[in-house]
């Protein structure tokens, strides 16, 4: 009972409240993006509402778990993720031209979403198990780099370039923070520069088209249609927007993927610059809060783990807003907590739930309480 009271006391209520507000905005604008007079509340809106309820449950369960249990099974868990990625390529469900989903009864999920949150688990498990003999040579990071490369290749093969990029960036930043020598990045950049022509030919036609569109090429009625409609929606919202359910680009079906990748455009059109700034401000406050917690953690390896858990959320926000405003190429990344999509929503809730339990163990809880928790659960504290 004592520990239960302390858990309740150190629960990060501010982050949880911000997540709930963003999720409510998500349900509201999925409703708007899919609203039709004949069917006011679409199946997508109902699923998103259900997803938020399940997400809250997942968040609370992950917050109540000891994150060290997860790390004890890090190798096995990520082996299962790799197996699921391979299975997806071979027998996965196809949707919108991509083979990214695995069907489980009435539900489908994306194994690539699991890689976002579970690669950090694998990486920290490896780093901790080898911490006694580590001398920070590039050769010691080869198993991690190999697993990161395999994961990204399997994800890109589906094809899912956006998620592959997120996993790659998250993994490389974690390894940089863990001490991967800078010369690896210098060599890597030189290698990418030399092999750029080959990499370009390896891209699929639609991926090449997206890069060319970002560089200003393509017809406004064909290749640039999606991004041009997004910019029209954003610009037509003005300062205060056209009003809820009154966005013409959305309602007249000019804006593709309005409930998923381009939902921020719907928000801009209906609530204007004010609404867009409110959403961005909510994300900024959330990320500032999470970084404040990371800086207050007293162990470097746990700081790296905590960053790895939230990195995919931060990258997704930056990339999504960047691509719908034509500041980045369109790569098909949803806006966390707001875009429609249960796999992404639940994984994001799980990530921040595990982050919350790290916060309760390290950022706020006093050392004596951590010792008592460890003794009760018979776990070895990390030094």
Image (tube, rainbow, N blue to C red):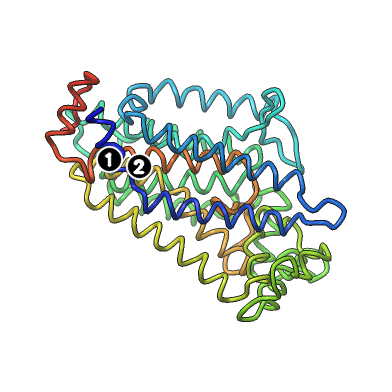
Q: Where is residue 9 in the image (x, y as percent from the top left)?
A: 27, 42
* Vertical side of 315 occupied by 299: above or below: above
Q: Residue at x 42, y 49 (%)?
A: 16
Q: Residue at x 43, y 20 (%)?
A: 76
Taking depth in this image into account, of 239 and 132 the one nearest to the observer is 239
* Vertical side of 236 occupied by 35: above or below: above
Please indicate whether residue 270 sits to the left or right of residue 185 in the image. Answer: right
As drawn, the residue found furthest toward the bottom would be 239
Secondary structure state at the residue bearing disc 2: helix
Q: Which label belongs to residue 156?
A: none
Whether residue 153 is visible, yes or no, is no
Taking depth in this image into account, of 123 and 246 the one nearest to the observer is 246
Please indicate whether residue 227 sits to the left or right of residue 63 in the image. Answer: right
Q: Quadrant of the C terminus?
A: top left
**Label 2, residues with CA under 10 Å away: few <14, some 14-19, many ≥20:** many
Q: Position of residue 260 (x, y in %)?
A: 67, 52
Name the residue carrying label 1.
360
Secondary structure state at the residue bearing disc 1: helix
Name the residue carrying label 2.
356
Q: Do the residues labelled 2 and 1 touch (CB within 8 Å)?
A: yes
Taking depth in this image into account, of 297 and 315 the one nearest to the observer is 297
**Label 1, residues with CA under 10 Å away: few <14, some 14-19, many ≥20:** many
Please indicate whether residue 299 sits to the left or right of residue 40 in the image. Answer: left
What is the CA distance from the residue labelled 2 to the residue labelled 1? Answer: 6 Å
Q: Position of residue 371 (x, y in %)?
A: 15, 29
Q: Which residue is drawn at 37% across and 53% down?
A: 14
Q: In which quarter of the image is the N terminus?
A: top left
Q: Where is residue 319 in the image (x, y as percent from the top left)?
A: 54, 59
């Amino acid at each position: 009972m004592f520990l239960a009271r302390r858990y309740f006391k150190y629960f990060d209520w501010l982050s949880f409240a911000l997540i709930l507000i963003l999720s409510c905005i998500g349900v509201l604008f999925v409703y708007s993006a899919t609203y039709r007079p004949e069917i006011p509340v679409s199946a997508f809106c109902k699923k998103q509402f259900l997803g938020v309820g399940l997400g809250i449950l997942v968040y609370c369960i992950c917050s109540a778990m000891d994150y060290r249990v997860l790390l004890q099974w890090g190798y096995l868990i990520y082996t299962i993720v790799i197996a699921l990625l391979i299975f997806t390529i071979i027998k996965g469900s196809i949707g919108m031209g991509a083979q990214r989903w695995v069907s489980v009864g009435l539900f489908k999920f994306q194994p690539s979403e699991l890689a976002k949150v579970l690669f950090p688990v694998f990486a920290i498990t490896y780093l901790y198990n080898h911490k006694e003999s580590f001398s920070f040579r590039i050769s010691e990071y080869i198993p991690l780099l190999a697993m990161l490369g395999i994961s990204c290749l399997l994800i890109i093969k589906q094809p899912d370039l956006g998620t592959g990029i997120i996993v790659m960036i998250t993994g490389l930043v974690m390894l940089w923070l863990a001490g991967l020598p800078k010369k690896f990045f210098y060599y890597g950049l030189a290698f990418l520069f030399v092999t750029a022509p080959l990499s370009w030919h390896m891209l699929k036609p639609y991926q090449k088209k997206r890069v060319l569109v970002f560089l200003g090429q393509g017809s406004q009625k064909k290749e640039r249609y999606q991004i041009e409609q997004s910019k029209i929606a954003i610009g037509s919202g003005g300062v205060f927007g056209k009003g809820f359910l009154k966005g013409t680009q959305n309602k007249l079906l000019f804006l593709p993927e309005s409930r998923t990748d381009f939902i921020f455009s719907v928000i801009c059109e209906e609530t204007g610059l004010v609404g867009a700034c409110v959403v961005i401000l909510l994300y900024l406050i959330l990320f500032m809060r999470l970084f404040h917690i990371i800086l207050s953690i007293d162990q470097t390896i746990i700081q790296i783990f905590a960053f790895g858990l939230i990195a995919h959320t931060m990258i997704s926000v930056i990339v999504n807003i960047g691509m719908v405003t034509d500041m980045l190429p369109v790569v098909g990344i949803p806006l966390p907590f707001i875009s429609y999509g249960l796999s992404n929503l639940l994984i994001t809730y799980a990530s921040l739930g595990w982050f919350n339990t790290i916060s309760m163990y390290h950022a706020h809880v006093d050392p004596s309480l951590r010792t008592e928790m460890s003794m009760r659960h018979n776990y070895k504290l990390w030094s």
